[in-house]
Image: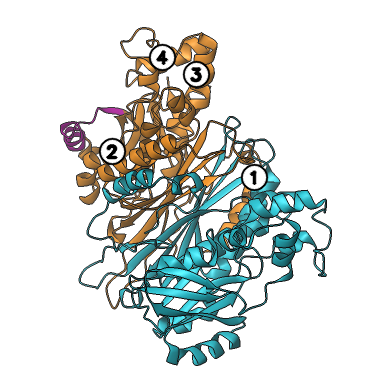
Chain colours: A orange, B cyan
Amino acid sequence: MRYRDAGVDLAQSDLLKHGIVTAVRSTWSRAVRPIPNGFAGVMEFPAAGSGAPLLLAATMDGVGTKLHVALAAGRVADAAADLVYHGANDLLVHGARPLAFLDYIAQSRLDREVVTAVVAGLARACREVGAVLLGGETAEMPDTYLPGVVDVAGCMIGSADPGHLITGEAVRPADVLLGLGASGLHTNGFSLARHVVAQSGLELSDLVPGSRVTLAEALLAPHRWYGPALWPSVAAGEVRALAHVTGGGIAGNLERVLPRGVRALVFANAWERPELFRWLIEAGGIPEDDARASLNLGIGMLVVCAAECAAGLKRALADAGETVHEIGVIARGERGVEWVM
Amino acid sequence: MRYRDAGVDLAQSDLLKHGIVTAVRSTWSRAVRPIPNGFAGVMEFPAAGSGAPLLLAATMDGVGTKLHVALAAGRVADAAADLVYHGANDLLVHGARPLAFLDYIAQSRLDREVVTAVVAGLARACREVGAVLLGGETAEMPDTYLPGVVDVAGCMIGSADPGHLITGEAVRPADVLLGLGASGLHTNGFSLARHVVAQSGLELSDLVPGSRVTLAEALLAPHRWYGPALWPSVAAGEVRALAHVTGGGIAGNLERVLPRGVRALVFANAWERPELFRWLIEAGGIPEDDARASLNLGIGMLVVCAAECAAGLKRALADAGETVHEIGVIARGERGVEWVM
């Protein structure tokens, strides 16, 4: 279990992380199925009578800085929906199905239109991923929030069959790494993107240079939900690991699901980066390493499968509407991710 | 299910509430067990094989303004712990047991000490209520949060036996209303309390006039967790309804669990208000109606039971360490709560 995703400062202090992890683990019972660096927490749900217990999976996320772009573009419902897709993908990574979502909406002063739009967006996405919007809390805190903005966080709860839990432990050398196309930034890299846009002098209503979509459209493209395409393969046991490309980019998230003794090679030229990413990197003068560490570069979900399954899986995913790139390979070696080219 | 607890502005607009409720309900499947005005959402958790499914219960809450007092007094861990007690009590109201908690911690700039303290407080309280700290998210958003403060929200997940679900539907005329003592404000009324303290010219380190505890100690007294005392009676089916006294005070929360055709009479003089409440009301010149609507007045949990069970239940709860007051009675009439005296 990876307890903190976005803690930039925290990541710098192993001692502190240790303290937090120790506190968290002090609460764990034998019901917990620890997944090191997991995208969601997983534990046994108590069974009624003699039935074998299904697993409960849950993950907490915030929308983050994407909300500022969404507010500016009058599209806060879409950013809220993304939070649901994000949580659903985090569960999917471990073979869990969405079941329920609960939200937290906070502002300096509650703005009816904003709250209504947020809930509408959450509800729409919940219907899509098959989660019930089971509860929520709105908070009005003028001494905590800046005026005119909103924060939205949410907890996605799901269930998993213990026999289909995916942890990455099954990954083996010679496995193939597939990348599924992202629709845009998804929910990460928005601090960077906002900075680049501000520097560029462009407005959100301007076109992304070299493309026919506006910056608002490109930046707010909905976070892709990979469940419909991936479920059949997950249920059939054809997937050895999944990694949701969130904060930390392709390498940062892929590394989370690699077991000891294997490394991944990612071929940087195996896919064409979407226009938005090319423009952000060029206009912002973003060094390649930083771009790789903060942006998904057009790949929203990583799939590791056995080499003999790769062709069939690629076809199935493409048939289900995904853009599939074969972007790497698993090799023997020290646990980690190496960019090739 | 009561979708919004703290939405002051929202509560003024039935139309808007209707819109939100419609959106929320559009996500509901037949697995949902709707509890009108409930303290938590409840639904079936999928069963493995033929076992009868247990119910999943979940609730989202924020600490709210108590965090400001806690920050000023250097006791942020205690305020974080209260969020866990709050969520656990919300589940208890429906006969559900805590299972897992997930948190969201956000600041303008993450402060290591604050985040560590928050997680330590959450973990301590999770151990106490028997919940696993299953996940969490930290967010750093300088364009959303004011500097130097923190917001903490969290989702408490639990399980309930369908046979022991408590919804208030069982409440009958002539039932007895018991009130369990609160340790302080719990997590509500802090905006009001901060205002009174600021007006009074007292510091948090000053004594509450007429008492031997400081304002900080009184205001930050931990939110009481009623599970250990109430579980045996809940499991034995001796409780007809529970109401957690949160935002909205005694009447506002009691009304949430009353079925149609019954009203509750609350005897305002049936218990002595703790010193802190007496001082807040007097020093702040708070009208009685406002005090009743915003403060728990020393009662943290309401218990409705059949008259013939009352004596035994009072004894059992007192033996378990609770301060128990018989504060009212259920009568025939239009659904609502009437203060007597």
Labels 2 and 1 positioned on one and the same chain: yes
Amino acid found under the numbered disc labelled 3: Glu
Residue that label 2 marks: A226
Labels 4 and 1 positioned on one and the same chain: yes
Left or right of residue B59: residue A49: left
In the rendered structure, the residue with mark 4 lies on which chain? A
- Residue A14 is marked as 1
In the rendered structure, the residue with mark 2 lies on which chain? A
SS state under label 2: loop
A124 relative to A155, above or below: above
Displayed quadrant of residue A163: bottom left
- Residue B20 is marked as none
Marks 4/1: CA–CA distance? 34 Å
| Residue nearest the observer in this picture, A196 or A22 | A196
Which of disc 1 and disc 4 is earlier in sequence? 1
Q: Is A296 within the magenta?
A: no
**What is the magenta range?**
A311-326
Left or right of residue B294: residue A42: left
Marks 2/4: CA–CA distance? 24 Å
Q: Nearer the viewer, mark 2 or mark 1?
A: 2
SS state under label 4: helix
